[in-house]
Image (cartoon, rainbow, N blue to C red):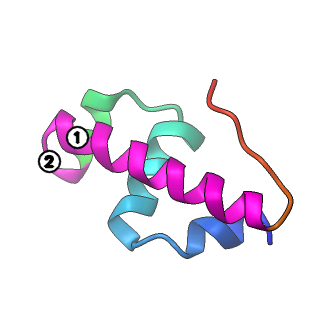
Amino acid sequence: MTLLGALAELPPRARAMVVLRYWEDQSVASVAALLRCSEATVKSQCSRSLARLRVRLADAGLSITES
């Protein structure tokens, strides 16, 4: 299991939010504008997605941290 493999398991919209927010270092407002959703949606989806990634990677013996 790699981070890319774990990301691939996320639903497409959630994956896009995580990639834009953390990989591309976009602001919450920028991601919300790009994906035409509210900032609250970006925050909640990213939080849920990161939790799922942590569990999936922990199961594989890996970990991620939020900076």
Q: Tell me the magenta residue range.
A: 35-59
Camera-side residue: 8 or 34? Answer: 8
Q: Residues within 10 Å of mark 2 (few under 14, many from 20)?
A: few
Secondary structure found at label 1: helix
Q: Residue beneath label 2, please?
A: 37
Q: Residue beneath label 1, please?
A: 32
Query: Mark 1 belongs to which amino acid?
Result: Ala
Magenta-colored segment: predominant secondary structure:
helix
Determine contact: label 2, label 1, CB under 8 Å.
yes
Camera-side residue: 38 or 52? Answer: 52
Please state the horizontal and vertical placement of residue 51, each as a whole percent of the image: 52, 50
Instruction: Check if residue 29 falls in the magenta segment.
Output: no
Q: Residue at x 32, y 30 (%)?
A: 28
Please state if 28 lies on the left or on the right of 35 as rendered. Answer: right
Instruction: Check if residue 58 falls in the magenta segment.
Output: yes
Q: Residue furthest right?
A: 61
Q: CA distance from mark 2 to mark 1?
A: 5 Å
Please state the horizontal and vertical placement of residue 7, each as a whole percent of the image: 59, 65
Please state the horizontal and vertical placement of residue 15, each as a whole percent of the image: 45, 61
